[in-house]
Image (tube, rainbow, N blue to C red):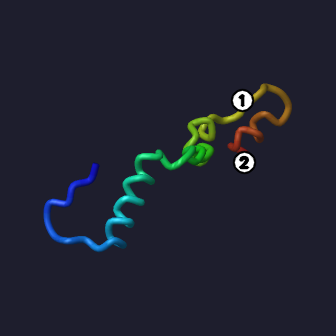
């Protein structure tokens, strides 16, 4: 039930407010799916690949001379 307490709305104004209230009450359908998480801030990016001992391991570590 809608009660007008002040003023005299036109038929178009009443139709607009009823439409808005009906749309809000219906829930608006299914929500949009959440976006996939970004890998930009992933802590896994900070983890370095393990170094394996053997020929060329020192150069592979990034400390090449």
Residue identified by numbered label 2: 65
Q: Which corner quadrant of the image does residue 4 belong to?
A: bottom left
Cα distance in 3D space between marks 2 and 1: 20 Å
Front-most of residues 41 and 62: 41
Please identify the residue farthest to the left as the structure is shown: 6
| Whole-percent x, y for residue 40 in the image | 59, 48
Mark 2 or 1, nearer chain start: 1
Q: Quadrant of residue 5?
A: bottom left
Q: Residue 44 location, x and y as percent? A: 62, 36
Q: Nearer the viewer, mark 2 or mark 1?
A: 1
Residue 45 at what x, y percent from top left? 62, 40
Q: Around disc 1, counting alpha carbons within 10 Å, would you say few (fewer than 14), some (14 to 19), or many (20 or more)?
A: few
Residue at position x 20%, y 71% from top? Answer: 8
> In this picture, is 4 found above or below 56?
below
In this rendering, would 18 be left or right of 50? left
Instruction: Determine the residue positioned at 78% across, 27% down.
Output: 52
Residue 65 can be seen, yes or no: yes
Whether residue 33 sits left or right of residue 25 in the image: it is: right
Relative side of 20 to 64, left or right: left
- The reply, left or right, for residue 48 in relation to residue 9 is right
- Seen in the picture, residue 15 relative to 47 is either above or below; the reply is below
Tell me if label 2 and label 1 are in contact, CB under 8 Å: no
* Residue 43 horizontal/vertical position (percent): 56, 37
Q: Label 2 crowding class (10 Å Cα cut-off): few <14, some 14-19, many 20+?
A: few
Q: Residue at x 78, y 25 (%)?
A: 53
**Which of the numbered marks, if any, corresponds to residue 50?**
1
């Amino acid at each position: 039930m809608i009660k007008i307490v002040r003023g005299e709305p036109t038929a178009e104004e009443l139709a607009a407010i009823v439409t808005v209230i009906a749309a809000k009450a219906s829930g608006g359908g299914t929500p949009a799916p959440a976006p996939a998480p970004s890998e930009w801030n992933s802590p896994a990016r900070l983890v370095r690949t393990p170094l394996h001992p053997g020929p060329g391991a020192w150069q592979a570590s990034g400390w090449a001379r």
